[in-house]
């Protein structure tokens, strides 16, 4: 493996800033690595390397001496195929947009490129980002590098696989129900679902929607913090966007503060089953936080109505966002898309009002919970990576799920609270598949969450195990 591939993102940026390496060196290294590995995993179906090289030449001639913490100095990144990148094929994982080339970029991409990022590829996603297994009719399945017979999760699966396989140093993701957190857990990388508005959006149909967010993915917490610094900032096209913080997020990880009081919940008060092997790995990991001086308490806010709240709000969001696109193309999209549409059409104003009121009370309970705790920690997923040919988990223990997304209730319950949440690698199953923790911080508390997560990551000492060469079942 080319030694440049093994650099962390922050190490690579440091070398870019000093001129020890150039952006073109990293683009070449990434191209070589993609060529070596992507046949095995299918993470990056669309490449835009020449576009990146052209932009790199301008960066090399201009702004490499900038000292802004948000400046990432020509580091190559990959972008989830749900985000528009000007002039680059963007399919949203759907046959309806198989040949779509946008005439502009999402504001998140503009922020990243203005801060020196170089987009080298688009990462695979399920159709319109719906589903926690990354496959679609345009590009096929994306496979888990830890065992290429297994799913990488979704919907930011291509991004997670590219990171774990060493194809890139940073990647974008998005998250409505679990889409930054599940693939990060399944691939042993880090994915952060930030607060709504933290990363500005544009070119969207529902600008006031606060269920889905965009965020960073990387191989470790420090790299996630650096990418977040390059992504944040308000924008006039996003009415819920937040201003960049006064202190960079990298300062939080450079001076990590261990949590003092941690709430551990195996299943958020019993709202979901959890595979016993996954739960045991997660609980053992959480108990080691006592080595940081943390008090670990079994506790959780009341999430008893989170499932119903999310179901209703998600169905409404789906109709508002996608009905105009898919209504006249029902025969061209996957069955789950049509099912979602029909669920939304069944809603009444009374149901929506109840869900909104319920979410308000849930958010209040969750915020009050952090008066007593620094973190809430759960398993990031209720199962380990599974056979890639299984579209979704339909059973866990003796519980049978009623739809294709209820198996990630443990993640979407947190979505309903708007709390920032990070997926952090914590161990492996007996057969070597990754397991992650969902580490949840206080309202708009990305800095304290990242600071605590850095301390925990240092304790676990797992982050340096990626990147890896993809491994087949036979390995």
Image (cartoon, helix red, strand yellow):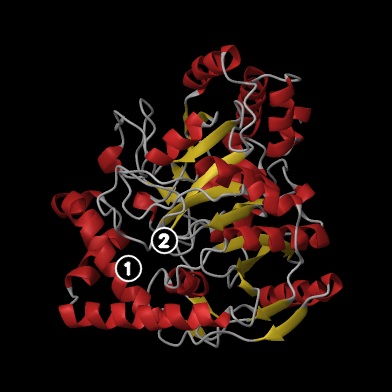
Q: Residue at x 32, y 68 (%)?
A: 314
Question: Is residue 156 at least partly visible in the picture?
Answer: no
Q: Nearer the viewer, residue 212 or 80?
A: 212
The spot of residue 144 in percent (x, y) is: 61, 50
Q: Which mark is residue 314?
A: 1
Rendering quarter of residue 447: bottom right
The spot of residue 313 in percent (x, y) is: 30, 71
In three-dimensional space, the C-alpha distance between marks 1 and 2, rounded to whole angstroms, equals 8 Å
Q: Is residue 134 left or right of residue 318?
A: right
Could you tell me which secondary element the residue under label 2 belongs to?
Answer: loop
Farthest residue to the left: give it: 328
Question: Is residue 370 at least partly visible in the picture?
Answer: yes
Q: Residue at x 67, y 77 (%)?
A: 279
Q: Quadrant of the N terminus?
A: top right
The spot of residue 186 in percent (x, y) is: 61, 58
Write down the residue under mark 2: 176
* Pointers 1 and 2 in contact (C-beta within 8 Å): yes
Q: Residue at x 43, y 74 (%)?
A: 406
């Amino acid at each position: 493996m080319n030694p440049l591939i093994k650099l962390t993102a922050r190490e690579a940026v440091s070398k870019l800033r000093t001129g020890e390496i150039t952006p073109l060196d990293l683009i070449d290294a990434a191209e070589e690595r993609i060529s070596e590995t992507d046949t095995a995993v299918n993470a990056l179906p669309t490449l835009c390397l020449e576009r990146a090289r052209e932009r790199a030449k301008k960066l090399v001639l201009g702004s490499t001496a900038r000292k802004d913490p948000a400046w990432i100095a020509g580091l190559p990144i990959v972008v989830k195929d749900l985000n528009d990148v000007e002039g680059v094929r963007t399919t949203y994982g759907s046959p309806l947009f198989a040949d779509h080339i946008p005439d502009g970029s999402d504001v998140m991409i503009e922020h990243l490129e203005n801060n020196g990022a170089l987009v080298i590829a688009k990462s695979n996603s399920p159709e319109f980002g719906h589903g926690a297994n990354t496959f679609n009719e345009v590009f096929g399945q994306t496979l888990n590098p830890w065992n290429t017979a297994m799913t990488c999760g979704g919907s930011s699966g291509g991004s997670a696989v590219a990171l774990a396989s060493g194809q890139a140093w940073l990647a974008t993701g998005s998250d409505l129900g679990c889409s930054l957190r599940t693939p990060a857990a399944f691939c042993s990388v880090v994915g952060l679902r930030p607060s709504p508005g933290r990363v500005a959006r544009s070119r969207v149909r529902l600008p006031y929607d606060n269920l889905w967010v965009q965020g960073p993915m990387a191989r470790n917490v420090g790299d996630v913090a650096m990418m977040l610094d390059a992504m944040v900032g308000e924008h006039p096209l996003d009415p819920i966007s937040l201003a960049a913080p006064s202190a960079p997020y990298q300062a939080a990880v450079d001076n990590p503060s261990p949590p003092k009081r941690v709430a551990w919940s195996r299943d958020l008060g019993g709202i979901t089953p959890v595979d016993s092997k996954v739960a045991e790995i997660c609980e053992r990991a959480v108990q080691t936080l006592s080595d940081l001086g943390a008090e670990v308490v079994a506790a959780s806010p009341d999430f008893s109505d989170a499932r119903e709240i999310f179901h209703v709000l998600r169905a409404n969001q789906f109709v508002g966002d996608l009905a105009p696109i898919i209504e006249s193309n029902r025969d061209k999209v996957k069955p789950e898309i049509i099912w979602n549409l029909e669920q939304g059409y069944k809603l009444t104003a009374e149901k929506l009002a109840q869900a909104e009121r319920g979410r308000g009370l849930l958010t209040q309970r969750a915020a009050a919970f952090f008066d007593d705790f620094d973190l809430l920690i759960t398993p990031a997923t209720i199962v380990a990576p599974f056979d890639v040919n299984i579209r979704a988990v339909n059973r866990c223990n003796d519980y049978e799920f009623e739809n294709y997304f209820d198996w990630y209730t443990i993640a979407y319950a947190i979505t309903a609270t708007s709390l920032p949440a990070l997926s952090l690698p914590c161990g492996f199953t007996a057969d070597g598949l990754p397991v992650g923790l969902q580490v949840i911080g206080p309202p708009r508390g990305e800095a304290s969450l990242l600071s605590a997560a850095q301390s925990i990551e240092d304790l676990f000492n797992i982050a340096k195990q990626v990147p890896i060469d993809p491994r087949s079942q036979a390995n």
